[in-house]
Amino acid sequence: MTTNLIPTVELQKAVYQKLSAHYTTYDLRPPNAQFPYILIGEDVTVDNLTKGDKRTTHNLTIHTFSQSTKSLESKTMNHLVKESLLNDLELNGFYVDLNKLSMMMTTKEEETDRAIHHGIIQFDITIREK
């Protein structure tokens, strides 16, 4: 039993480890962040208990940011995030029961000097204690 481990914390650690292997990854973007980068965003958690298991479902949002003149870099980053998190996501003290992509999009945010491509990727991840 993993009573001293917190599901959202272990999920964040695993996500950070996967994504930071490819791009600079933040939980809170510093003012001087260099593009491109990934931001671990919002996590909505819901208890999903069964008779014998303590389970939680997490709607996790990941943001990608690029200042490239075209959206190709942002879309490539989004794809990498999707592939990294859907394949072999391992958490300390928890099993991943279900992991699915619920949404992926790329938007453009206008800045004074150039556009920022902003990718938004959401996952529904159900985990249970080992």
Image: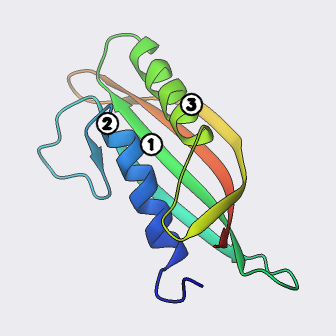
Query: What residue is rendered at 45% in x and 51% in y?
Result: 15
Query: What residue is rendered at 88% in x and 85% in y?
Result: 51
The span from disc 1 to disc 3 (Cα, nearest Å) is 15 Å
Q: Is residue 31 left or right of residue 83?
A: left
In the rendered image, residue 59, in percent from the top left (x then y), is placed at 64, 59
The span from disc 1 to disc 2 (Cα, nearest Å) is 16 Å
In the rendered image, residue 19, in percent from the top left (x then y), is placed at 39, 40
Query: What residue is rendered at 41% in x and 43% in y?
Result: 18
| Residue count near mark 3 (Cα–Cα under 10 Å), binned few <14, some 14–19, many ≥20 | few
Residue extending farthest to the right is: 51
Query: What residue is rendered at 48% in x and 46% in y?
Result: 62
Q: Is residue 9 left or right of residue 68?
A: right
| Residue count near mark 1 (Cα–Cα under 10 Å), binned few <14, some 14–19, many ≥20 | many
Q: Mark 1 or mark 3: name the one nearer the start of the chain.
A: 1
Amino acid type, residue under disc 1 in the picture: His
Q: Is residue 111 above or below residue 61?
A: above
What scheme was used to colour the molecule?
A: rainbow
- Please name the residue that numbered disc 1 is placed on: 63
The span from disc 3 to disc 2 (Cα, nearest Å) is 13 Å
Amino acid type, residue under disc 2 in the picture: Ala
- Please name the residue that numbered disc 2 is placed on: 21
Amino acid type, residue under disc 3 in the picture: Glu
In the rendered image, residue 69, in percent from the top left (x then y), is placed at 32, 11
- Indicate the quadrant containing the C terminus: top left, top right, bottom left or bottom right: bottom right
| Residue count near mark 2 (Cα–Cα under 10 Å), binned few <14, some 14–19, many ≥20 | few
Q: Mark 1 or mark 2: name the one nearer the start of the chain.
A: 2
